[in-house]
Image (spheres, rainbow, N blue to C red):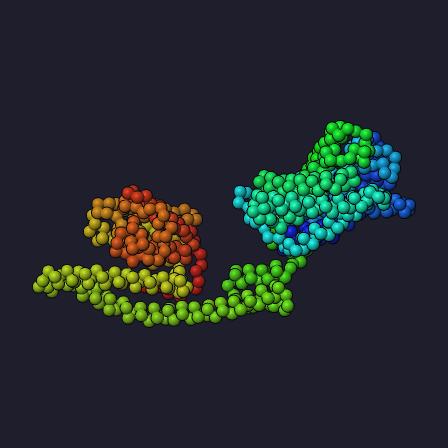
Amino acid sequence: MQPGFACLESGLARSKNSINVATKNVADFIICTFFYMVIGFGLMFGESWHGLFGTSFLFFNETDPKLLAFFMFQLMFCGTAATIISGAVAERMSLRAYLVVSALVSLLIYPIFGHWAWSGVVAGGTGWLASIGFVDFAGGTVVHSVAGWVSLAAVIIIGPRIGRGGPVRIPFRSHSLPLATLGMFIIWFGWIGFNGGSLLTADERVPLIILNTMVAGSMGGLGALAVGYGVYNRVGVTDLLSGCLAGLVAITPTAHCVSLVDAAVLSFIGGILCLAAARLIEKAGIDDAVNAFPVHAIPGVWGTLCVAIFGDLELIGTGLGRLEQFGVQCIGVVAAMIWAFGLGYVLLRLVDLVVKLRVPEAWERVGLNVSEHEESTDQMELLRLMEHHRRTGDFTRPIEVELDSEVGDIARQYNLVLEKLSAAKAEAEQANATKSKFLASMSHELRTPLNAIIGFSEMMTRKYFGELGSEKYEDYANEIHKSSSHLLDLVNGILNISTIESGGYNLNKSLVDLKTIARESARVASQSVKEKNLKLVVLGDNSASDLEADPRAMRQIILNLLSNAIKHTPTGGSITVEVGASKTLHTVSVTDTGEGIDREWLARLTEPFATSATNPYLAEGGVGLGLSIVKMLIDLHGGTLEIESEIGVGTEVRITLPTRAPDAGADTGARPAG
């Protein structure tokens, strides 16, 4: 059974926890062997003290061959009870805490209840449940329900795995469903020994017990198939495995006293009840990693009640009527729930105060294979290296390939992708360098003729040398001046963005007075303010501390914001520039009474070329780069930009800057044009 549970639980766990789950299946059997040998077996099967616990066979050291064989058989039951819990708490309970849980189960919780139901086999006296006629042939309640109730208490205390809590639960991918399937079959095979050996003798009843067991596993799986196709139109692999195991649990209390047909029926129902319980606890937000509670506790309860529902009363041999037997069986399952869940919850809460049950969040995220054992799988190592590539952006070092393995094949294909990506990156970097060289060389070539065009067209529009001779010429001159100015703005904006993006813009920091810069910017924009008959006000505390920043960048930021506000504020409106300061932060807000911007466009305003062509709420005439440049310059200073606007009311742009600007590279004096 132990190898089967190791395969099942580690296969259902995620790859990053599979080694830890397998390790716990080894560790719990080690712990159970010690504590069951020292105390547990004596408490369970020793001379009964008022039907509550045993007092003999403590520190087990017997020599009778029959007793030794019986001890070995019962040790397997105890190990099964403990290892069931490991699956429920997988992926988030520490190994240290789990060892304590295994000790409590094998030392106290399992043996005491086992004494109530099974004592009297090798020593005098019977447990109080057995004395009233409670029947559990091979441990449907004693082993499986007890372990299931402790599992439920544990998962409630430690909570769901990261990503499995809340209304949106991330589906987790099992490490290896074929391995889990193999584990289920090993458990199924081991169940033959559990149920077949529970008579403690080999007689003519054993073949039917074994056949009932084999049929029960199949019928539990059939119940899972019925639910899968009948409710979900598909069958989940985990559901199918759970259904088979649930059928085996359901037959365990009754394998000796029911017919083959009855065994098939009750096991079929047990598979259905298991899946229903799994959906129920999932909706309740309880994260049982391998469905330990639905598989073991619920079918265990059902199978124990079926002793009275389907069992042959003569074979049961308690002398009770069917209704009386059902009442006794109910007392037994309720006692198991109160004892295992109640005591288990209290003890685990106390343990959690001393030894934290749950591993730290960082450990859980990286996986318990690494965090608890410094072990990893090939797949996890591949993912770690891929994550390193993603985080650093360095694709020059390929992943070492292990030949003739699945992970090696993936790594080889990934390395081919890396080669293509590295080549594409090199081409992109070369293209970017070429672009930068082109823009640098074209800066003078573009600006010189544009400045000449602007200067001459301005002379013509202002008629410095007399009349032009025709109104048409005046219109043409105005259009030339307007278009060339627009084109120069566009060129300057593109060059600014290119310089910042390429890392060529470095902050030349000094102490600046933001309010003074705001006033200077207002004077520069005064002509445009007069032309639109706007009211422009600059507010701020004259005694505020200076800001450590690049002065020219601050002028460009405020001028761009003012230019936008003037452009988008109708004639007769108002614009307010307010400067604020504290020991750690400086703020500048530019508020206008323009037409406002719809909320859906606010997040896109800092994108390059976000103009009236793409945003109907922006006025015409801009090139769509002003706010993009502002955002980049603010980012260089470690600041933030916020925009609030309401249609028909106006817009406020607010920037916040740290009083001491962060370093932005060496001071080379590079500047954006314009």
**In which quadrant is the C terminus drawn?**
bottom left
**Which of these two is toward me, 577 or 211?**
211
Task: Tell me where residue 411 appears, x and y as whole percent.
Answer: 58, 65
Task: Tell me where residue 143 appears, x and y as whole percent.
Answer: 75, 41
Res. 280 image quadrant: top right
The residue drawn where x is 75% and y is 50% is 189
The residue drawn where x is 61% and y is 66% is 408
Single out the residue that lies furthest toward the front.
Answer: 261
Relative placement, left or right, of 361 versus 655 is right
The residue drawn where x is 35% and y is 49% is 601
* Relative height, residue 14 to residue 295 (above, below): below
* Relative height, residue 630 to residue 326 (above, below): below
Task: Tell me where residue 147 appears, x and y as whole percent.
Answer: 72, 41
Residue 634 visible somewhere in the drawing: yes
Res. 673 image quadrant: bottom left
Task: Tell me where residue 174 appears, x and y as whole percent.
Answer: 62, 53
**Which of these two is toward me, 207 or 398?**
207
Relative placement, left or right, of 464 versus 485 is left
